[in-house]
Image: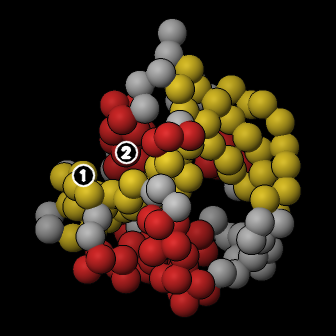
Amino acid sequence: MIIRKAGPRDHDALARIWLESWYSTGLKSLFDPGLSMLRARIPEELAQGWDLYAAEEAGEIAAMLAIHPRDFYLDQLWVAPAHQGRGIGRALLAFTRQKLPDEIWLRCVVQNESAWRWYEREGFLFEGEEDVPPSHMRMKRYRWKRG
């Protein structure tokens, strides 16, 4: 697997992975951003400081990662459903820890139990809950600090 900076040509594939991965959580009924919203959000977030990465497996984009390095924020980590269960998420998290070696914080939708339980197993500590736009869903906030 290769993790690389994503370019404009990747945005469409990354938006699809983001949407398909969100749908795979079974939470589409809570919030359905649709492909056009996610396509539009990528350049907006890049303009606000996102570092966006694509993970490729056998020449195919299999996952996306978006971080806000100045805020130590892991904003998005999504693995395409067809590529889940192969350690790609763990590799992206290790990559994030290389980029943000001292501290990382993130949010997970309260109802996405498999995601927040995974982050807990990866050493993230629960800090609280909050409503987050644009969905205004209830989110759990987690933080990891070195040693």
Is label 1 in contact with label 2 (beta carbons under 8 Å)? Answer: yes
- Disc assigned to residue 92: 2
> In the rendering, at what x and y percent does residue 96 appear?
40, 39
The crowding category of the residue bearing disc 2, from other C-alpha atoms within 10 Å (few below 14, some 14 to 19, many at least 20), is many
- Direction from residue 7 to residue 85 in the image, left or right: right
> In the rendering, at what x and y percent does residue 143 appear?
64, 30
Q: In the image shown, does 48 or 145 lie closer to the viewer?
A: 48
Q: Quadrant of residue 55?
A: bottom left
Residue in the image at 50% along x and 16% along y: 146
Q: Amino acid at mark 2?
A: Leu
Residue in the image at 61% along x and 36% along y: 105
Q: Quadrant of residue 27?
A: bottom right
Count of picture labels:
2
> In the rendering, at what x and y percent does residue 6 appear?
28, 64
Residue ranking furthest to the top? 147
Q: In the image shown, does 111 or 50 lie closer to the viewer?
A: 50
Residue beneath disc 1: 3
Residue in the image at 77% along x and 71% along y: 135
Disc with the residue nearer the chain's start (1 vs 2)? 1
Residue 122 appears in the picture as rendered:
yes
User: For the residue labelled by badge 2, is the local secondary structure a helix, a strand or a loop?
Assistant: helix
Residue in the image at 73% along x and 55% along y: 109
Q: Amino acid at mark 1?
A: Ile
> In the rendering, at what x and y percent does residue 20 appear?
51, 76
Residue ranking furthest to the left? 59
- Disc assigned to residue 17: none
